[in-house]
Image (cartoon, rainbow, N blue to C red):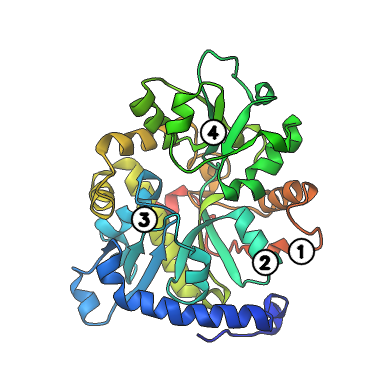
Amino acid sequence: MTFLWTPDSSRLALNRRRFLRYSSLAVGAGMLAACAGGSQNTASSDAAPAAASGELDRVTFGTSWFAQAEHGGFYQAVATGIYEDHGLDVTIRMGGPQVNGNQLLMAGAMDFKMGYAIDAINSIQEGVPKVTVAAIFQKDPQGLLAHPGVGIESFEDLQGKTILMSTSAHTTFWPFIKAKYDLDESQMGVYTFNVGPFVADENLVQQAYITSEPFAVKREGGFEPVILLMADHGYPNYTTTIETRREIVENNPDLVQRFVDASIKGWYSYLENPAPGNELIKQDNPEMTDEQIAFGLEKMAEYGIIKSGDAETLGIGAMTDDRWEEIFTVMADLGAFDPSVDYRQAYSLDFINKGPEAYQS
């Protein structure tokens, strides 16, 4: 793998240790890509006649988890030929608990990946040259779940409660709610992406994607959990972002523009008629049910996860300098970032903010 160095990106140059780490990853990623057809679920526009003649640019996009409604717009763009119309032959590769998307992106096994703003800024802090070029989710769907009828109706009621959290939460939302609501480190429990312990113990609180875990709780426990959405209480993170390597932004901005435009159009299409995308989601993730997908779509609409804030006027995928500054300032004040980090290197507004009408023609 080759890293391209320019004066503008010199601050992002990987030091020798990181270069060696990512160079070794390139070898592993190449092996992974060579055998991916037999080991990973994929959704691609391989039926396109133009792809066979080499007219389409082949692109690999990595998601953050197993296929679900929260990824629907990307699958929709494959299923309905939107990517094809933009000269792209796109393969979607699912993420999961054992998949390190950042490593695969930097090693060249992916061209674009799904991410979130806090990690993007942290990557700049660590000298990793990746750039966020769109933010599909204006609100982070991350929240907390509590049992009904036990006196937990707001974040202020969390004092003394054990909160089950994943490892990544320790550097994302936990510092935020800990500081804002005067919580204690002793309250942290371990969340293993299994709602069973929470269902069994009414005294527990757990982290959750509000589009997913509440459905599992209702199915396994037979009750509707209390949902506390952090985005509605000052947590500013962008999620389901589109990230790529800085070298692609600098050397092939047309490819970036086409992928961003097509993905955003895919999301508008999916929210209007999700059936085509849902079929591909279920192909990639056979455990995904129509009921779970419908629940995810319902919650995304109910809480304004996609079409809210700046996206209402600037279009799906919108980002602003002010919002990125807020994310950085809030998290830097909590000690998550060095205040001297040039967080502006984490994103580009060059490919978005065209207005809803630009993506619905």
Instruction: State the residue in front, 56 or 229.
Output: 229
In primary-sequence order, the first of circles 2 and 1 is 2
Label 2 – label 1 distance at C-alpha: 8 Å
For badge 3, the amino acid type reads Phe
Label 4 – label 1 distance at C-alpha: 32 Å
The residue sitting at 25% across, 69% down in the picture is: 38
Q: Secondary structure at mark 3?
A: helix
Instruction: State the residue in front, 218 or 5.
Output: 218
Q: Disc 3 designates what residue?
A: 74
**Whole-percent x, y for residue 306 in the image:** 48, 42
Observer able to see residue 361: no
For badge 4, the amino acid type reads Gln
Q: Secondary structure at mark 2?
A: helix
Say whether marks 2 and 1 touch (CB < 8 Å). yes
Around disc 2, counting alpha carbons within 10 Å, would you say few (fewer than 14), some (14 to 19), or many (20 or more)?
A: many
Q: Disc 2 designates what residue?
A: 124
Give the number of the disc on residue 244: none
The residue sitting at 62% across, 30% down in the picture is: 162
Around disc 1, counting alpha carbons within 10 Å, would you say few (fewer than 14), some (14 to 19), or many (20 or more)?
A: some
Instruction: State the residue in front, 109 or 178.
Output: 178
Label 4 – label 3 distance at C-alpha: 29 Å
In primary-sequence order, the first of circles 4 and 1 is 4
Label 4 – label 2 distance at C-alpha: 30 Å
**Whole-percent x, y for residue 323 in the image:** 67, 49
Give the number of the disc on residue 206: 4
For badge 2, the amino acid type reads Ile
**Whole-percent x, y for residue 351 in the image:** 52, 63
Location of residue 99 (image quadrant) = bottom left
Q: Disc 1 designates what residue?
A: 341
Around disc 3, counting alpha carbons within 10 Å, would you say few (fewer than 14), some (14 to 19), or many (20 or more)?
A: many
In primary-sequence order, the first of circles 4 and 3 is 3
